Image: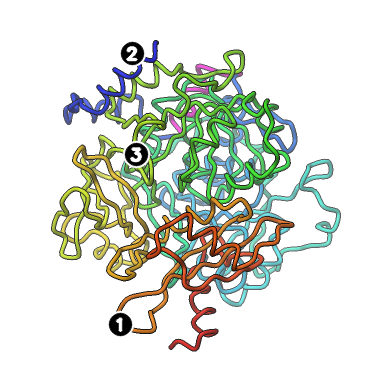
Amino acid sequence: MSREALGSEYKTCKAREVVMNYYDIKNELTKNGEIVTHILERWARQEKNRTFVYYGEEDRKYSFREFDQITNSIGNALLSLGINKGDRICVFLKNPLITSMVMFGIWKAGAVFCPINFNYKGQLLAYQINDTDPRATFVEKELMPLLNDIKDLIKPIPVIVYTPKEGDHDYKPVLEGITLDTYFEEHFFVEMTKGDTSHVDVDLQYMDNASIIYTSGTTGSPKGVVQTYRWLNNYVFNWRRIFNQEDVIYNDLPMYHVAGAFFNLVRAAWVGCECAMWDKFSVKDFWSRIAKSNSTSAVLLDVMVPWLINPPESAADYKNTLNKVYMAPMPQYHHDVAKRFGFDFVITGFGQTETGSGSICIIDELDGEQGTPPELYKGMSKEEIIAIARKFDIHVVDAKKDETKGILGKPSLLFEANILDDFDEECPPGQAGELVFRPKFPSLFVKEYFKKPEATLRAFRNLWFHTGDACFKNEDGVYFFVDRMGSVIRVKGEFVSSYQVEDIINGHPKVNICGVFPIPAEVGNEQDIVTFIVPNPGEQLGEEEMREWIKEAMPKFMWPKYIRFVEQLPETPTNKIEKYKMREQIKKELGIE
C-alpha cells in the first residue's frame, strides 16, 4: 500500500462512524467461545504440534497438545483433592512456566486462580492469604520458609509444593534441606502432572469467576479484583485482532500480574500463537532472547524503555523481529525509540485490573521509514492491521503528524466511556476529569472487590465504574491520559501533571528514572513540586546542572522547587512507585506537618 493510500486509511479511521451494531459486537465477542480453556483445547485438537509455550530459561518447547494434557492432569488432580467449582486457590510461585500450567489447571477444575506476588512475606503475605481464604495453595520450595513463618497467622491449608529437580535452571542444592511445617497438609506438584490427562469434566460459563487479582495500591490494604471468564475475553478482545499464528509474543513479566498472565499468555492462547517466556526482564539478554525466539511483540513497562536505550546506538539496532511493541506509560520519545529499533507499530491504550482493556491506540511509527526488515517480519501486514483497526474502531495515528502525548485512543466497542467531574457531570472536550466506563454486556468488568461491598459500590456509583484516572477527550472522542486522580498539581493557577514533569525529566541523558509529586506550598492553598531523581549508573548529576536543563525543557510553573537525588525510588511489591513515601521523607526534612 502506498503512503498516499495509507494516508487515506488514517483519514478514514479518524472520520468514520462505528458500523457495528450491538448484535455485531456481541457476535464478535462470543462467536469463537468465551472460555479460555476451551480455546486451548480447540487449538490442541487442531494444531497438536504447534508450539504454544517456549520456555527460554531451559530452551524447552511445549506444544498446544502437550500443554493441554499437562493442565488436564493438574485439573483432574485438583478434583481428586476435593476442589470444587468456585473454590479459590492461591498461587505463590516464581517460575512462570509452572505458574502458567497451574493457572490453566485451576481453571480446568473450575476453581479460581488467585496469584500472590512472590516478593510478599510476613504480614503482607498473611493478609492476602487470609483475605482470599483459599481451599489450597501452590508454593515453590524456595518460598516455603515464608509460608512457615506465618503459620500462626493463617489457617492450616493444603499446600502443593513445586520442587525444581536437579538439572532445572532454578534448582538449588540448598533447597534440599527445606521442609514444610507439619502445620500444613503437604502435596507434591510433580505428582499432579503424571495423572489423568483426559478432558476435565467441569461446566464453565462466561459469568463464572476465573481469577482474583489484588491491586497493590500505595495506601490502604490491597483489594481483590474478582474477574470472570468474560473479563479475560474482554481484556484480549481488541489486542488479539491484530495478531495471527505467525506471531510470537515475548513475556518476561511476572505471572501474578495481569500483563504477564493474561495480556501475554491468554492472548497467545486465544490467537493460537507462541508465547516465548523468561523468568524476568534482562537488559543484557533482551535482544538475544528476541533473536532466539523470533518474537514479534513485547510489552515494555516503565523503566524498561530507558534501560534499553542506554547502550550506545548501532546502525544495526533495527535488525530485529519486533514489529508491535506495547509501551506503558508511553514515553514522549517513543518515536525515537521506534525509529532506532525498527518498531513498525507502538501500541498503547487504557488497561486496568478492574475494567480490562478500556481503549486501544495503534501508533504507526515508521510510515515510509525503515522498520522491521522484510526478511524478519512476521504476523499481519501493515495493510491488514490498518483494515482491522477500521473495522473495530481502533484509533490509528501517524507518529509524525498526530498528537500522541498521553494518548489512550478510542474506547473499546465493548464499553461506553466518558469524562466526569467531581459531581459525575460530563466534562466538555479538553477538560480533565475522571475516566469512567460502563459495560455494554454482562460480566465484562470486575464483578466485585472481594469481600469489600462498600468499595465496590463506591467504584460503581451513578452507574459508571470510576477508574481513578484523570483524563480528557477531544472533539473526535479520542481519550488522553493526564494523571492518576490526586496527582494533578496546582501551581500558580496552573494545573500541572506529575506524569508530564516526569516524562520531561526522564528525557535528560543522565536520568534513569524520577518520581514527581506535590507537597503543600509555604503560602496559600497551592502546592510545590518535588522530584526524586535516580541518575544513570556511573553518571554524576548535580542539582545546578539539573536546574539549568529544566529551565530549557519546561515552563517556569512546572519547575520542581525541590530536587533530591537518590539511588532508587521506593516501590510496592508490584513495582509501582510509592510517592507517598517520598512525600513523607521530604516533608520531614523540611519540617512540614
Which one is in front, 525 or 125?
A: 525
Outermost residue toward the top in this view: 1
Q: Quadrant of residue 486?
A: bottom left
Measured as percent of width and height from the top left, residue 194 is found at 67, 37
Residue 228 colored in magenta in the image: no
- The residue that label 2 is drawn on is 5
Side of 318 where 483 appears, left or right: left
Instruction: Using the rendered image of the protein, determine whether residue 460 is visible from the camera's viewpoint.
Output: yes
| Label 2, residues with CA under 10 Å away: few <14, some 14-19, many ≥20 | few
Measured as percent of width and height from the top left, residue 565 is found at 62, 68
At horizontal 31% and vertical 30% (from top left) the residue drawn is: 394
Q: Which mark is residue 403?
A: 3
Outermost residue toward the right in this view: 173
The magenta region covers 37-49
Which one is in front, 506 or 325?
A: 506
**Above or below: residue 97 compared with residue 119:** above
Measured as percent of width and height from the top left, residue 141 is found at 72, 56
Q: Quadrant of residue 308?
A: top right
At horizontal 40% and vertical 64% (from top left) the residue drawn is: 556
- State the separation of the CA atoms marked 2 and 3: 21 Å
- Quarter of the image with the N terminus in it: top left
